[in-house]
Amino acid sequence: LDERFQNLKIDTSKVADSKM
């Protein structure tokens, strides 16, 4: 579960970085 949550957080960070 933690691994999945971390992966999602990374994906969100990547999207935010791309949007910025």
Image: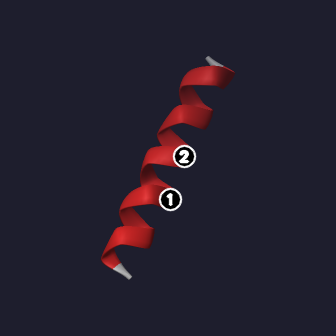
Q: Specify the amino acid type for callout 1.
A: Ser
Give the image's coloring scheme.
secondary structure
SS state under label 1: helix
Which residue lies most toward the top here? 1
Q: Is residue 11 above or below residue 5?
A: below
Q: Is residue 14 above or below residue 9?
A: below
Tell me the quadrant of the picture where the N terminus can be found: top right
Which label belongs to residue 13? 1
Give the left or right position of residue 19, taking residue 11 as reference.
left
Which residue lies most toward the front here? 18
Which label belongs to residue 2? none
Q: Specify the amino acid type for callout 2.
A: Lys
Local crowd size for mark 2, using a 10 Å CA cut-off: few (<14), some (14–19), many (≥20): few
How much space separates mark 1 and mark 2, taking CA atoms?
6 Å
Give the left or right position of residue 1, taking residue 16 as reference.
right
SS state under label 2: helix
Local crowd size for mark 1, using a 10 Å CA cut-off: few (<14), some (14–19), many (≥20): few
Q: Position of residue 9 (x, y in %)?
A: 54, 46
Residue at (67% x, 23% y) in the render: 2
Which label belongs to residue 9? 2
Q: Position of residue 16 (x, y in %)?
A: 41, 68
Q: Position of residue 3 (x, y in %)?
A: 63, 22
Viewer-nearest residue: 4 or 14: 14
Which residue lies most toward the bottom here? 20
Q: Position of residue 17 (x, y in %)?
A: 44, 71
Does the CB distance between marks 1 and 2 fall below 8 Å? yes
Residue at (32% x, 75% y) in the render: 19
Question: Residue 6's quadrant in the figure?
Answer: top right
Q: Is residue 3 above or below residue 19?
A: above
Question: Residue 20's quadrant in the figure?
Answer: bottom left
Which residue lies most toward the left here? 19
